[in-house]
Image: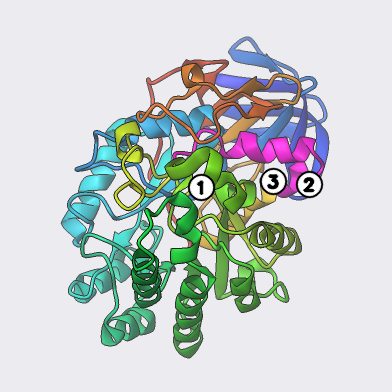
Amino acid sequence: MQKYLIKNTSIVNEGSIINGDLLIEDGRIAKIASQINATNDVKEINGEGRFLLPGAIDDQVHFREPGLTHKANIYTESRAAVAGGVTSFMEMSNTVPPVFSHDLLEQKYEIGAKSSLANYSFYMGTSNDNIEEVLRTNEKKDRVCGVKVFMGSSTGGLLVDNPLSLEKIFSESELLIATHCEDERIIKRNLEKMKASGRQLTAADHPLIRDEEACFESSFLAVQLAKKHDTRLHILHISTAKELQLFSNMLPLEDKRITAEVCVHHLHFTSNDYPKWGNLIKCNPAIKAPENREALWQALLDGRLDVIATDHAPHTWAEKQEDYLHAHAGLPLVQHSLPLMLRYVSEGRITIEQVADKMSHAVAKCFRIRERGYVREGYFADLVLVDPNQGEIVVKENILYKCGWSPLEGTIMPMGITHTFVNGHLAYEKGNFDNSRVGMRMTFDR
């Protein structure tokens, strides 16, 4: 396997930036020092003027395989991820068929092992009727990232609304439980009220239908169950200021039993953007009023929100062009999440050290991922080289998602990803990919 020596770079890791060299050997970070001398069998990369970050780890993506591959597949979306500096992902269970059995779960791992350019893990899916199968996941808790529960709002049989089922999952699962929290009863009530107005609904109505109350009530229930059973709970895509009262920054992340994720689109867009983007930014939970975005930023920076992710959820252009009620919900984001956060670094809203923490270190801590998420000797060489002066504008020609569009088209990304290493393999370099190696199945300390 090719050895690499990254010279004279600014290494961003664990709250600090140090200047030095880094040697990659046998897929791992072999040495970090102020100066390392190259040997004949080492390929040298000039990192001067660039930042070297741990690869981002996205704990929530929808890569659509199997069953929905007209939208995306594991190869196309992992390729887009690697181009954007995401070296590992955790993929959700709402494919076709949904991942309700261990046979189906392992089939997804087989697809990943053949086609994913990034490291991968897959969630076990839950329904009201597969609880015993879900609990079998306890037997492989070091090889599965978690159990996904749709609490209160979903489609395709994934909704878990039976109180007895929820009690059993929360009381007996030994894995992290990741929840989508929106209350279906509140959503239906709001929708019927909107329909009764007689006017044609638009995307601007989405945050009024899937409102703050729907999110809070469901998240509150999840927190109550987790506290009752001392469950390891991770609530996905927090979108409201009201929900933030459920989370704390009083403990270090590694000691928390209840953690929370914020997604890049909830940090970037507000309800003021619906007139421009319409259904293209329709997603669940909805992008809401500006005061929610500001509260999310505050909670991210003070430690109440623990990790940044995407909820990458591609749909075809045609599926987004339908009328509001029928347009599919979800945004493709995994290629642009790290560049977007680096844009906010350029604007002074967050530091590059905090980006590395929230997109790499914290995810590794939260899920107890083995030997990833840091720039440390002996760890897997999942690394991203960033040029602060080599950005680009998001246009159709450089979008790599299979769906071919992005709600960030026209956005200037001031910093650019020049190199992405996955397990020491140079998977991406300045627009070029090396598909000769695939990523690895992530493992966990549980």
Specify whether residue 117 is in view. Answer: no
Judged from the image, the secondary structure of the residue bearing numbered disc 3 is helix
Task: Compare marks 2 and 1 and give the one earlier in the sequence.
Answer: 1
Is 144 placed left or right of 431 in the picture?
left
Judged from the image, the secondary structure of the residue bearing numbered disc 2 is loop
Q: Which mark is residue 395?
A: none
Task: Compare marks 3 and 2 and give the one earlier in the sequence.
Answer: 2
The amino acid type of the residue labelled 1 equals: Thr
Q: Which mark is residue 349?
A: 2
Q: Quadrant of residue 348?
A: top right
Vertical placement of 184 versus 23: above or below?
below
Label 3, on which residue?
355
Vertical placement of 357 versus 29: above or below?
below
Asked if labels 2 and 3 touch by Cβ distance under 8 angstroms, the answer is no
Please tell me whether residue 211 belongs to the stretch shown in magenta: no
Residue occupying the point 74% across, 61% down: 298
The amino acid type of the residue labelled 2 equals: Arg
Residue 40 lies, in percent from the top left, at 63, 9
Q: Nearer the viewer, residue 418 or 336?
A: 336
Label 1, on which residue?
310
Vertical placement of 187 versus 271: above or below?
below
Crowding near the residue tagged with mark 2, few <14, some 14–19, many ≥20 C-alpha atoms within 10 Å: few
Residue 437 lies, in percent from the top left, at 39, 25
